[in-house]
Amino acid sequence: MENQRLSKLDRWREEYGALVIALACLYSAISSWGQNWILTSVLVFGTFVCGTFGFFDIKRAFKEK
């Protein structure tokens, strides 16, 4: 199954998916700032975690090319 060629969307999702999720978490954290501090702190933590995954995914993708 890994021998099949991936479509452009699949390759893009593999490289940049976690980074897009991190940006969505950041946007949600900013928009909910001050309303619910528990939700805001979870979203900020999610931003850091997904941003870290995204960074290393992009780094791995550049290394493979």
Image (cartoon, rainbow, N blue to C red):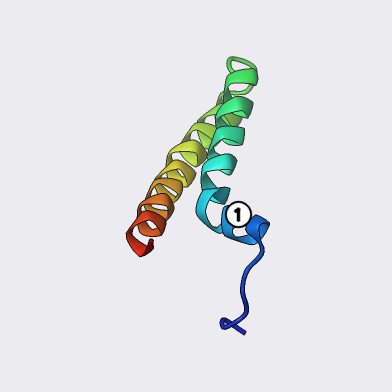
Q: Taking 4 as reference, is 7 above or below it?
A: above
Q: Is 49 placed above or below 63 here?
A: above
Q: Position of residue 18 (x, y in %)?
A: 53, 48
Q: Which residue is mark 1?
A: 13
Residue 51 falls in image quadrant: top left
Where is residue 7? Give x, y as percent.
66, 64
Q: Position of residue 22 (x, y in %)?
A: 53, 39
Q: Which residue shows up at 32% across the image and 59% down it? A: 63
Q: Residue furthest top?
A: 34
Q: How many marks?
A: 1
Residue 48 occupies quadrant: top left
Helix, strand or loop for disc 1: helix
**Amino acid type indicated by mark 1:** Arg
Q: Nearer the viewer, residue 35 or 62?
A: 62
Q: Residue at x 63, y 68 (%)?
A: 6
Q: Image point 57% across, 81% down: which residue?
A: 2
Residue projecting furthest to the left = 63
